[in-house]
Image (spheres, rainbow, N blue to C red):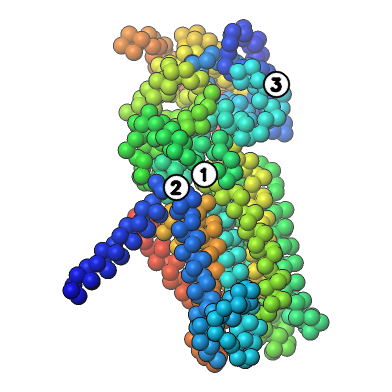
Amino acid sequence: MQITSKMLALSRTLALSKLLRRTLDVEAPLALRLALALGLLAALLLLSFVVTMAIGAVDVPLGVTASIVMQQLGIPVGAAATDVQWSIISHVRLPRVLTAALVGGALALAGATMQGIFRNPLADPGIIGVSAGGALGAVVAIHFGLRSIHYLVTPAFAFAGALAAVMLVYALAATRGVDPLTTMILAGVAVQAFIGALISAVLTLTANVNAMREIVFWLTGSLSARSWTHVQLILPFIVVGSILLLFFARDVNLMALGEDSARSMGVDVRRVRLIMLTLAALITAVAVAVSGIIGFVGLVVPHMVRLVVGPDHRIVLPTSLLTGAVLLTWADFGSRLLLRPQELRVGLITAFFGAPFFIYLLYRRRQGTSL
Amino acid sequence: MSALPAPDRIAGAALAVDGVSYAVGAAKLLQAVSLEVRRGSLLGLIGPNGAGKSTLLRCISQLLSPTAGQVHLDGGDLRGRSPREVARRIALLPQSTTVNFAFTCLEVVLMGRNPHLGRFQAEGAGDRALARQHLADTGAAEFVTRLITEVSAGERQRVLLARALTQQPRLLLLDEPTAGLDVQHQLQVFGLIRGLVSQGLTAVAVVHDLNLAARYCERLVLLHRGRVAARGTVAEVLTPPNLARVFNVEARVEHDPALNAPRVTVIAPLAGRQGRGAAASDPEGEQSK
């Protein structure tokens, strides 16, 4: 009997995996593949929210956590929560996981977009100077103690710095006659190096030890103590920016065949590229502004996603968004728990796990598996 | 050298290029180029490096906007049309295409449907059938699920040709469709194009190999320094004086009875004159991709 039930379970698993494979197969209709991938990831994201919020310095039962989330969404169900539980979840942990998810999603989507547009699997949101510019803005704000004016001054400076750096890269690349994509990458490298030097200079000039610590912290990214204000600040930018980016998903596919080919198939390449780079830079700037520099999410997530769903950007872009959200939620969870009661920097976690994973991907590719 | 006068109007020409010029700054890449292509025929564009062949193809496909002159397709002016509108009429197979993402060959061919689909419209069963049909036409039916990054250069070119056909264009533009292919695949690709043309497709191809041009094209246009140096049937264009004047080579042209086509044998570069084709610095250098 036991064997039979085991075989039944096994056959069910096999049938499910077969169904999964069939649905993920390129022959399956796009809408079905998309619905499956996004459905699974959305469920995973919700589950991640509840689990990572339930565990912490004070543990809250999963059921209570879930019911608080439901009540926040306006659905009055589930167990009653104590005031402390309610307050921990809805005022501390929920805004924090939401910020993590938004930032992770934005970075991954921006990374997937950049890799598609630059036709370069090594592109990430930082390639056109966004992250470096954001860092400089924040560093300046911290150095001059402007943070004491209002706690949102640092994010504002970071945002302004990120956009200024991108505009500088654009301006440098907008020379005629040379391939603008190559010029843009080179201009991005130059601007990043220049800004790096400026940041070092500011650090050297910072006499205040606390400010120095804070700068170093900011440069490795953190999501601690993020409030509803942060969520409200970034939510509209990231939601609208992401939706607009998805409009152009098929155009990115066509651009993979080169500018002339894409143009001859009806894509207004220059215009689409400008719009998409601007949107990707915008959502990255917003993410950097509230979280500091969090590396490897934008670089690695699109690669992971393509391994599973293939290279079609109509699926890669939205799937990267949700995968980035899930991953940063867990990375932030790790940053809270690994060295409890101390908190690690989340940028440290993403780099610690992201870099080896990326090397693994490169190794796989060398063995003949295409990215 | 002065440009030849515009050709006699061909009744019902599918493509008419009328006095097209293109300049970047002071460099005049094309000067008053005119040509016409009959429906269901293959026109070969030949000429030395930097003569303006690729630039002309890019002007015809509206990738570049001519600084003067017009391009008419089936009697309609192409100027001012959106990329999508042009893409429904003209397909272009660029000189070399590298694909950086591991799309399957079928996915690549389906991309050709883009100008016919709405922004959020996915490819339907009809589009898939069409894509498979053209993969079969180009002898690439078995590549459907193979990755475009993993097929050979010759196979990739066939898949990309199928992609261009899936656009259902009235005019197919080919920029050295056999560059980098071995002899067998050169003949295969041109045989394929020939077959499509005999079914009514109109095509213009930039061809570097004069013997391939002689064998597969009905008519030729010889470009030199951005101007039309000669045009007409293969026998009219591929003459030793033309080749000496434009390519600066001594050449022999014989009729090959086996192929029933002229055969060009280049004997030696001509001494004494500046070889335009081999010149290192060429102010009219063809715009690189």
Q: Are marks 2 and 1 in contact (CB under 8 Å)?
A: yes
- Secondary structure category for the residue under label 3: strand
Marks 3 and 1, how far apart at CA: 38 Å
Residue B71 x, y percent position in the rendering: 65, 22
Question: Quarter-wise, where is residue A325 in the image?
Answer: bottom right
Residue A33 x, y percent position in the rendering: 45, 53
Tell me the quarter of the image containing the C terminus of chain B: top right
Depth check, front residue: A124 or A101? A101
Is residue A102 positioned above or below A123 on the image?
Answer: below
Of the numbered discs 3 and 1, the one sitting upstream in the chain is 3
Dot 2 alpha-carbon crowd within 10 angstroms: few under 14, some 14 to 19, many 20 or more: some
Q: Which residue is mark 3?
A: B69
Depth check, front residue: B175 or A3? A3
Q: Which chain is disc 2 placed on?
A: A
Depth check, front residue: A50 or A126? A50
Q: Which residue is mark 1?
A: B122
Q: Which chain is disc 3 placed on?
A: B
Q: Kindly identify which numbered label has been placed on residue A200.
A: none
Residue A84 x, y percent position in the rendering: 62, 91
Depth check, front residue: A307 or A217? A307
Q: Residue furthest front?
A: A77
Residue type highlighted by circle 2: Pro
Is B76 placed left or right of B212 in the picture? Answer: right
Who's the residue at 51% across and 70% down the image? A45
- Secondary structure category for the residue under label 2: loop
Q: Which residue is mark 2?
A: A29
Residue B166 x, y percent position in the rendering: 47, 32
